[in-house]
Image: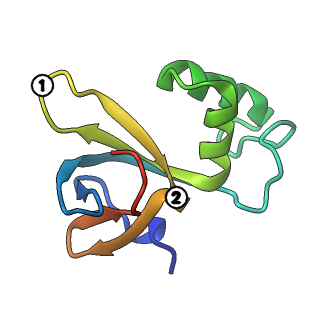
Amino acid sequence: MSVIEQVREGMHVVGPDGKKIGKVEDLKMGDPEAVTADGQTDPETGGLAGTLVDDFAQTSKLPRHEAERLLRLGFVKIDKSGLFAGHEYLASDELDRVEGDTLWLKAGQRG
């Protein structure tokens, strides 16, 4: 089972050093077999996924290429600790492991 399949909303997120980063606010499984999100059908609306990428890029305030990458790989949205800390999106390949109710990030990753 991949790491992202073990992640649940509300889990604590820590860096490789064990320092608290925040909590999992949301997650989305990706389609690792997809080359690009353009031209694929969105299962929820039946429309083209290109608009899904554009919508996600706009709401997440991420560049379109990063939004497409996250949708393809799957991602975790983290509600970062601290006043005015905001949110961060991490791709499934940036996740190290789940231990209990804690999600650990790989060394060298953001956080």
The answer to whether residue 2 is above or below residue 74 is below
Q: Nearer the viewer, residue 83 or 17?
A: 17
Q: Nearer the viewer, residue 48 or 30?
A: 30
As drawn, the label of residue 92 is: 2
Q: Nearer the viewer, residue 98 or 45?
A: 98
Indicate left or right for 41 with 8 as reference: right
The single residue placed furthest to the front in the displayed view is: 108
Name the quadrant containing residue 63. Answer: top right
Q: Which residue is mark 1?
A: 83
The single residue placed furthest to the bottom in the displayed view is: 1
The answer to whether residue 55 is above or below residue 49 is above
Q: Are marks 2 and 1 in contact (CB under 8 Å)?
A: no
Q: Report how far apart the C-alphas of labels 2 and 1 lie in the structure.
A: 26 Å
Q: Amino acid at mark 1?
A: Leu
| 10 Å crowding of disc 1: few (<14), some (14-19), many (20+) | few
Residue beneath the point at 41% across and 63% down? 106
Residue beneath the point at 12% across and 25% down? 83
| 10 Å crowding of disc 2: few (<14), some (14-19), many (20+) | many
Indicate left or right for 52 with 98 as reference: right
Q: Position of residue 33 (x, y in %)?
A: 78, 62
Indicate left or right for 111 with 85 as reference: right
Q: Position of residue 79 (x, y in %)?
A: 27, 38
The answer to whether residue 22 is above or below residue 12 is above
Residue beneath the point at 49% across and 26% down? 60
